[in-house]
Image (cartoon, rainbow, N blue to C red):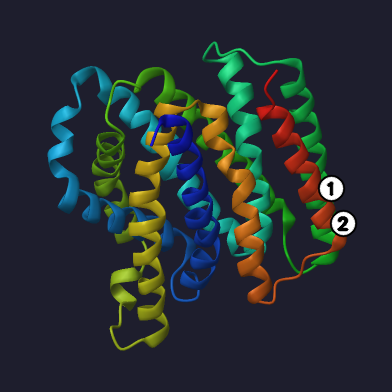
Amino acid sequence: MNNQQLKWLYLILLSLVWGSSFILMKKALLGVTPIQLGALRMIFTAIFLLSVAFPSLKKIQKKHYKYIVYTSLAGTFIPGFLFAFAITTIDSSIVAILNSLTPFNTLIFGATLFGFVFKRTQFYGIVIGLIGTLILILNGASLNPNQNYWYAFLIIIGSVGYALNANMIKKYLSDLDALAITTGNFLLLLVPAIIVLVFTDFFVTLDFNDEVLMQSLGYLAVLSILGTGIAKTIYNKLVHISDPVFSSSVTYLIPLVAIFWGILDDEKLSVLQVFAGIIILLGVYLVNKKK
């Protein structure tokens, strides 16, 4: 299978896995707090990766570690907590749609900070996507008055982190194996995540007879191993064989999967929100349109 075929295969796999991760976070939050979810997710993923991919760390050279630190913070640590807090107040399907801003941010920061070039049609795509996002937020606030849509800005900030992560991997870590990048990220995050977890009341309230908590930890285990450890490795590989904008466009397919799970979980979705999602997808098409 050549790189052209592989990049589309990776894109589809990631959309299925990450599209399901939002409902997993929502279910996990029934038994843990957002901070605990973010910390536990990193700890579980780190343990998994270090147990199966520890030898890959030998490939990391001294020149790489600065960017390993940057990508671990921008692509995992900060967004991990922001998304966990947002899902406590906004439907998981809406969070997934808002995450579609990532390709736009990838393009903007790629052009302004990393020297990547973009076309006029891609700029139009950015504007159209932002319009769709604004409609989504405003209509969601009126449709769900009990939900605090100010939390939508946490998703926007998280998408900026993902955008910086993709551009840094492409520009500064393209010579490093994708598995080594992911394992290195979580090796660095393991201690900070444990410290964060210690400062919550998780170990004080931990009860192995608590059925809700055990189910939450089960959801977290699936989310960490499949949705974070394996998926991030595939994503880093995708960035290597394509480009940051194409790789981040997976966030346009993620909502299709997330909306499916959201409907099954009785989440509300209006016709106007569907229309806003289509506008965002049009923006994606323009961002990725070839000459």
Crowding near the residue tagged with mark 1, few <14, some 14–19, many ≥20 C-alpha atoms within 10 Å: some
> Relative to 164, is 34 above or below?
below
Q: Which of the pair 46/192 is nearer the observer?
A: 46
Residue under circle 2? Answer: 272
Q: Residue at x 54, y 68 (%)?
A: 26
* Element carrying mark 1: helix
Mark 2 and mark 1 lie on one chain; the one further toward the N terminus is 1
Asked if labels 1 and 2 touch by Cβ distance under 8 angstroms, the answer is: yes
- Between marks 2 and 1 in the image, the one whose residue lies nearer the viewer: 2
Q: Is residue 172 left or right of residue 86?
A: left
Question: Which one is nearer the viewer's eye here, 246 or 114?
Answer: 246
Gap between marks 2 and 1, in whole Å? 8 Å
Q: Residue at point 44% right, 59% down?
A: 35
Amino acid residing under circle 2: Leu
Q: Is residue 79 visible?
A: yes
Displayed quadrant of residue 200: bottom left
Give the quadrant of residue 73: top left
Rendered view: 222 above or below 159? below
Q: Residue at x 42, y 40 (%)?
A: 235
Q: Amino acid at mark 1?
A: Ile
Residue 65 pos. (x, y %)? 26, 25
Label 2, residues with CA under 10 Å away: few <14, some 14-19, many ≥20:
some
Where residue 285 sits, quadrant-wise, is top right
The quarter of the picture where the N terminus appears is top left
Asked whether residue 154 appears in the rendered view, the answer is no
- Vertical placement of residue 135 versus 215, above or below: above
- Position of residue 39 in the picture relative to residue 274 (left or right): left
Check disc 1 and report the residue beneath it: 135
Residue ID at (48%, 62%): 34
